[in-house]
Amino acid sequence: MFKANEKNPRASGVLVHPTSFPGHFGMGDLGWGAYQFIDFLKKAKQKLWQVLPLGPTGYGDSPYQSFSSFAGNHYLISPNELKKQGWLWDKDLERPRFDPRSIDYGWAIEYKMGLLRKAFERFKAGAAAAHKSKLSKFCKANPWLEDYALFYALKDHFGGLEWHKWPTPLAKRESAAITEARKTHHDAIEFCKFLQYEFFRQWGEVKAYANKAGVSIIGDIPIFVAGDSSDVWANPELYMLDEHGRPTSVAGVPPDYFSETGQLWGNPLYKWEEHKKTDYEWWCKRIEAVLGMVDIVRIDHFRGFEAYWAVPATEKTAVKGKWMKGPGQSFFNALKKRLGDLPIIAEDLGEITPAVDKLRLDNNLPGMRVLHFAFDPTGASNHMPHNYEDSRTVVYTGTHDNNTTQGWYADSPENERDYLRRALSVNGNDVAWDLIKFAMGTNALYAIVPIQDIMNLGASDRMNCPGLAQGWWKFRYTEDMLNHHQEAQLRYLTEMFNRA
């Protein structure tokens, strides 16, 4: 299902989420920081930019726990771009001094929401008919927006309360209650629609700029959705829920490299038999929507389509879960039937069985390898390039869930560090760039590098640590941290290993 560039399929790129971009409003956004980064990619001859999921985030600020699988994260809307539209003025953008290297989500969101509401009021009062017509067309073209906008309005009205704790008529979507809610919360619903229109307008311009620069964007689909989301509220029949809308079993992974007690994600599990009855209609729409935003999509936790770890909702850790069969090939057959061949990367990390490998290979999907996992002194790790089966691989120095390479190397056992130094013929003093060069030289189809490694940053700048729910996703960099030396060094390696 995966199709690479036919002229030269080898490519390289950089992993960074828009929240990390430099800017003046508390977190990165789709303004000048995004365009500066794309210019850097073009000059460094990078063809790929990988982002994390772009949906609206909630408690914990994780992009992997979104209120919607279809909506965009309105916190990424650039105030400067709103100013260009005439919906914000110079005096509106007088701002407090935010930390340029870390995100304080509470403060930044409060400040930004004030700007977004002000922009909405000006839009209502003075937007040209052409803008309002575009908003109307956007709403009609995105039927998911009706449910999401009402969910957004109700969630705000009930002070962020989870939907299954709302009054029963609304939690169970009784017709009369929904009709009345749409009238009562009309203004909040329209505000949400404006936010989505503006997010997709700004993101569309960023994507067009990237594509014109020869850069394709790799997006990300978490296999599971958040229980407190419009997806589950609007489609409860597709999930394992009790009569009150609470999950009976939740998703996670068993004990692994990241955690001795496994990872308890807490997402509700799919009733795959219900999805199959509709020929996986909801999933087809979901992937189609994401591919309207990006060029290639990475599906997180691919192994869950073959078998997934189900944990009773009452458990406090993921230890007492069990493997349950996923939809398997029937799922991918439905995707092919509906959408044709798709540019999908399978995240196949963790406990991978021959059946998972077969499912990936039967659908011609590249998997992932991470060099932080490669340096088993026996040389037997399948993350070590000499053990790659073929070029249908995307190699990373590390991912958003890993430490930075500098931080990882400092924390690694000495026998692994020794093996790295001997295998790469280096002294370890510039380990991040040593690993970047190693990744570029593999036979992997794509080589992706987190921006922290390009900047040679340490452990304090890692993006996330699996198993620890709070305090992550805060990484930011400043404009001067992305420089011409890095650009030249990256371009040199890209050309050397035929990835330009």
Image (spheres, rainbow, N blue to C red):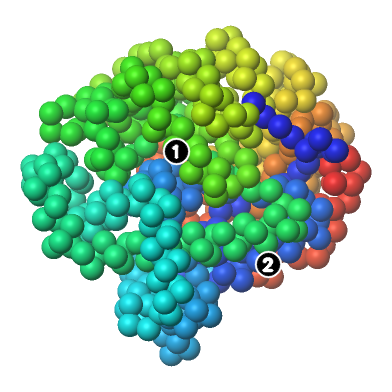
Q: Is residue 303 visible?
A: no
Nearest to N terminus: mark 2 or mark 1: 2
Q: Is residue 430 visible?
A: yes
Residue type marked 1: Arg
Foreground pick, 304 / 339: 339
Quadrant of the image occupied by residue 339: top right
Residue 389, image x, y percentages: 75, 17
Q: Residue at x 51, y 39 (%)?
A: 288
The disc placed on residue 195 is: none
Above or below, 493 against 381 in this view is below
Instruction: Name the residue at 91% across, 43% down.
Output: 496
Residue at the right extreme?
496
Q: Position of residue 416 (x, y in %)?
A: 70, 28
Pick the residue in front: 319 or 49. 49
- For the N terminus, the image quarter is top right
Instruction: Using the rendered view, name the quadrant where residue 427 is placed.
Output: top right
Which amino acid type is shown beneath numbered disc 2?
A: Gln
Q: Secondary structure at mark 1?
A: helix
Cα–Cα gap, marks 2 and 1: 30 Å
Q: Is residue 223 left or right of residue 441?
A: left
Residue for badge 1: 286
Residue depicted at 19% across the width and 33% down the height: 246
Tag nearer the camera, 2 or 1: 1
Q: Which residue is mark 2?
A: 36
Residue that extends furthest to the bottom in the rendered view of this protein: 91
The crowding category of the residue bearing disc 1, from other C-alpha atoms within 10 Å (few below 14, some 14 to 19, many at least 20), is some
Left or right relative to 404: residue 236:
left
Image coords of residue 231 (percent x, y): 32, 40
